[in-house]
Image (cartoon, coloured by chain):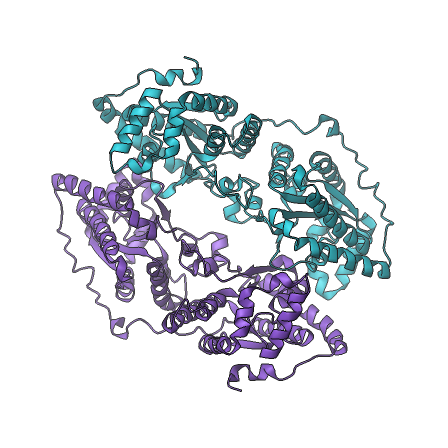
Chain colours: A cyan, B purple
Amino acid sequence: MVWSVFEAAETKHTLSEEAYKQQVPTLRSRLLSLQQTVRARGEFPVLILVSGMDAAGKGETINLLNEWMDPRYMLTEAFGSELDGSPRRPRMWRYWNRLPPRGHIGMLFGAWYTNPLSERMSGLIDAGQFEQSIEQIQQFEGMLIAEGALVIKLWFHLSRKDQRKRLQQLSKDPDTAWRVSDRDWQHCKQYDRYLDVATTLLRKTGTEQGPWHVIPGADSRYRSVVVAKQIADKIEARLNVSAPPTRRSIPLLDPATEQCDRDILDLLDYQQSLSAKQYKSALAQAQSRISRLSRDARMHKHSLILVFEGMDAAGKGSTIRRLTAALDARFYRVHAISAPSDEERAQPYLWRFWRRVPEQGSAAIFDRSWYGRVLVERVEGFCTESDWRRAYAEINDFEQQLTDHGAVVLKFWLSVTLEEQLARFRAREQTPHKRHKITDEDWRNRDRWPDYADAVCDMVAKTSTAHAPWTLVPANDKKYARVTVLNKIADAVETRFQHRGAL
Amino acid sequence: MVWSVFEAAETKHTLSEEAYKQQVPTLRSRLLSLQQTVRARGEFPVLILVSGMDAAGKGETINLLNEWMDPRYMLTEAFGSELDGSPRRPRMWRYWNRLPPRGHIGMLFGAWYTNPLSERMSGLIDAGQFEQSIEQIQQFEGMLIAEGALVIKLWFHLSRKDQRKRLQQLSKDPDTAWRVSDRDWQHCKQYDRYLDVATTLLRKTGTEQGPWHVIPGADSRYRSVVVAKQIADKIEARLNVSAPPTRRSIPLLDPATEQCDRDILDLLDYQQSLSAKQYKSALAQAQSRISRLSRDARMHKHSLILVFEGMDAAGKGSTIRRLTAALDARFYRVHAISAPSDEERAQPYLWRFWRRVPEQGSAAIFDRSWYGRVLVERVEGFCTESDWRRAYAEINDFEQQLTDHGAVVLKFWLSVTLEEQLARFRAREQTPHKRHKITDEDWRNRDRWPDYADAVCDMVAKTSTAHAPWTLVPANDKKYARVTVLNKIADAVETRFQHRGAL
């Protein structure tokens, strides 16, 4: 037996009807009561990933669990393979958008495993691309677990003989024949190769916090009881730990940058400026470049994702307005990021940004962004240290997925000196229709500036990547800052269009 | 001049560059400050519907307004025509799902007017179907206004000569040629007919609360200033009324039912019951019918929408579980309706149900539903009397749209006598794992029963329609109730399949 992962699952497992009938009532009420507690506590979601061989009873088991538990707080999602059609958003988008919120139990049929498996089987992706998919899964599940999710991974297994028998049975019955696809038969014919691919997948995605459980699929009674017990045990164990599980420590990008250059913002040349006349012509030129590029046919295969961060009163809003003035309103959407809604609070941190990821052919402009976690949330202590420390890697991964899918991702830090900020605060206080823009919080943030400066240094050091670079813009002169930002965007889009072949 | 609606818009309107430059700064800051107030108050959304002739400057105006106001709190949505492809959800679904929340300004390009207009022009729909679309719009806009939205409707007009000139100009310039479609030229060639259809549309959809403003589109400066002034005036007027506008009084379904039969629930036969043996075989039979029907190929063109309402402890949850036990978990979703999320609270009442409308080929099961408005919200005073009074018509309209699109809509009231409810409350208090299901609120609701009974009578009288009937189920015997509900569902789906041609 070569496939040691599955060895135990191939020995004959059965459960007599009598034993089944005896165990089920206790199991059901145990599951139901655990579900109620998960719901009442509302602290974490339970994700049950149901994957494995065709005809191994995945669908039956999901239906059974829906019957045994309260279907009102279950979320069942079926993810087929997406071999055909090129999606308009990055692949992981559809998984992010269908995650169960805290307090709910999600049964994810196939989940994020069906695609890489099918693609590798059909030869659509090579071993290297398969590895990349696996890495994406590792990062995604690592994030889910770090965010507190309980992830239960079930792999349904059948021996070669049992699989053929099950497929034949299903095909014969007119009530079930529709469930057997050509692909199922193909996988069955390539049984050894399928096991080979699956073994790699399981070995590389099973972790301490998210291990795989191989479920013998041949005997339905045995299968059902084992699955139900597994789920009940896992939920019970999770409910019994008072603190969330130890978070997986994610290595920071580069230990050398741990001591980042604290002077980075002081080194900018704040004297740079444009005269009113220079500004007028330079702005018009930059806007015209951007306008043309946004309507270029090549834009249909790309999207544009722009992040604006910076000190209060650094001119983010007015810069964004100069940018959108060059764009068709149907092309872009501006997202002003403030406190999350309660639906967003019930999900992992990046969920609220994933739901705003633009389709290809359009733009999303973020006035403040996912960097809030490593800026205000870090400085103000709104999240734990381990939360913001792991955020760097999560953000890099997020942005990598965006750029891999054709997005041009640019991040701007608009920087003003403390003197200039003070002058702007004062000016705002004097202007009636701008007075609302300056609050006590702005003054508090100003007092905290050294902490923010540290956070900015770390952020730039750890998240300025080749595919999604930070641009630090000295913004004491608004005119200079606006033109610089707009030209940078145009440059980046042009470069991306030219190097499209290199993707 | 036959088209009197547009007459005023065809006389020569221009604005000199000088006058424009003089007026714009004041207008811009007025708009911006009004936008800030709308946002700060957060009481209502502003919907600016931009419709009208091709090439009349709709896109330019939307871009200009995005430039003049703060794009972070604008939502620009473009709705093209949907001539091709049959949508998987009712037509209005896509409008519901893109409404701006309270405090935001939505610019809706084409909005819900493009489709009926294009379809009528192309002959895809006849005069009767066109009337139906108009009626749907009337109801939708009436609901939006009643919910507090400020709806500003702009119709951009061009004379025959000006339209041809503009289309030619746009076609010549390579930067704008992409904006001129074949359909635009077709509409231009059929200018008279287009005006005819548009006149009907405008005359029938202009109301006191949502009037049309015809904007002369030929001169861009004049057009921009008129639009901006119109919007500013409207927002200002709305902000100055302290109370929301007088709600349009929607006639109740049938005045004769105003005195509904208060005995309706007392007349049910609560003695009906099934023996354990009868139940076992009847349940299995009903489940097998439902299971088969849900997998029938004809189901792909239908959806199933089931509403469960009833007194506390009437057995809604356990009935739903008997139903879902017969279904594949990928086919249905159960929605337990409790307090709305904050995103839902910022939208019209029915929004949270529209977002849960199932695709064709699937089912949505509601444990409590949109009837909360005319039940608990009415009885507890959570909404105004005018809110729940207009809800009957809004709900009937909502359900009509669902059934028109192929949905089978069934509504069940599970009714137990007060004695039986008391017995069940007591039993729950004695059972440890059911104790959480009985709260002080349940006891309070019980005391309020006469008010609830009144609300139920009104609800059934006013919303039990041929296309979406109520079924009152005596549920003192749970077994009888479950089998009755399941068979009723199977009957309705069967009937719908058989009469598909009659739709």
Q: Where is residue A213 drawn, in percent x and y?
A: 42, 23
Q: Is residue B107 above or below residue A421?
A: below
Horizontal and vertical percent for residue A487?
76, 51
Picture quadrant where residue A64 is located: top left
> Does residue A403 appear anywhere in the picture?
yes
Q: Is residue B173 or residue A198 the one in the foreground?
A: B173
The answer to whether residue A372 is visible is: no
Residue B301, percent across and down?
A: 33, 52
A85 relative to B102, above or below: above
In this image, B448 relative to A44: left or right?
left
Location of residue B17 with respect to A317 vertically, above or below? below
Residue at image coords 72%, 58%: A322
Say left or right for A43 vs B26.
left
Q: Quadrant of the C terminus of chain A?
A: top right
Tell me the quarter of the image containing the N terminus of chain A: top left
Q: Is residue B280 left or right of residue B34?
A: left
Percent position of residue B458, x then y:
28, 65
Q: Vertical placement of B499 versus B135: above or below?
A: above
